[in-house]
Amino acid sequence: MAGIGGGGVQGYVCTPHEKQSGSLIENWKKSDNVIDIYFVTATFSDESVPYFPNKANHYTLASFSDMTGILDDIKRYNMDRLSFMFSFSSPLFERSGDKLNYVSLYFTKYTNGDLALSDLANAIARREKVKKASLAQMQLLASEQPKFTFPYSKNLVILEVRSDAPD
């Protein structure tokens, strides 16, 4: 999978932060494929419960450059709860900067090519702290798939927000 603008981040994987996740994190720290690792808290709306029934509140978020080994790692460590993989499908914009402060995910009804996405990208680009905005797809990783399919899994917008720019 070719990188956006070179061999950079191709997506994120979000695995439950549990007792057994320590060895997975140690493995990822040694991996050339994993770029950064973060501890995150996830919030889910009440409407999302049927789509994500076995969710956790605390996750390990890792950015990766190639999806290939990530799926194998998650299967090998056999997580009990739902994990998520977010892979970039199309960049909206990217600007240089360090100090990533948070990653924010939004589900949208719009698909790639919709005029509304161009308007959305232009509005987001006005925010100086947004380092990168990309369209992405979500894949659920679980031993047992949920009964209901999340309708917007192919329509995500991921924002990478930095802390080194003024508002």
Image (cartoon, rainbow, N blue to C red):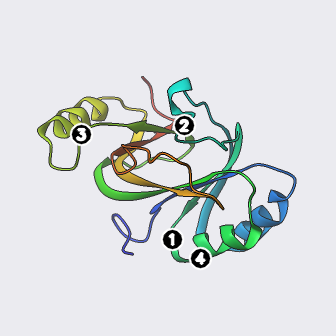
Point out the tag, 2 or 1, that comes first from the N-terminus. 2
- Count the marks: how many? 4
Q: Which residue is mark 3?
A: 110
Q: What residue occupies the far right of the structure in this picture? A: 19
The three-letter amino acid code for the residue at tag 2 is Pro
Task: Give the number of the disc on residue 50.
Answer: 2
State which mark lies toward you, 2 or 1. Answer: 2
Q: Which residue is mark 4?
A: 69
- Disc 3 to disc 4: CB gap under 8 Å: no
Where disc 3 sits, the SS reads: loop
Q: Which residue is mark 1?
A: 67
Where disc 4 sits, the SS reads: helix
Rendering coords of residue 50 (x, y %): 54, 37
**Horizontal relation, residue 18 to residue 3: left or right:** right
Point out the tag, 2 or 4, that comes first from the N-terminus. 2
Point out the tag, 3 or 4, that comes first from the N-terminus. 4
Q: What residue occupies the far front of the structure in this picture? A: 147
The three-letter amino acid code for the residue at tag 1 is Met
Quarter of the picture containing the C terminus is top left
- How many neighbours does mark 2 have within 10 angstroms: few (below 14), some (14-19), or many (20 or more)? few
Rendering coords of residue 164 (x, y %): 51, 35
The Cα–Cα distance between marks 1 and 3, rounded to whole angstroms, is: 25 Å
- Disc 4 to disc 1: CB gap under 8 Å: yes
Q: Is residue 59 above or below residue 130?
A: below
Quarter of the picture containing the N terminus is bottom left
The three-letter amino acid code for the residue at tag 4 is Gly
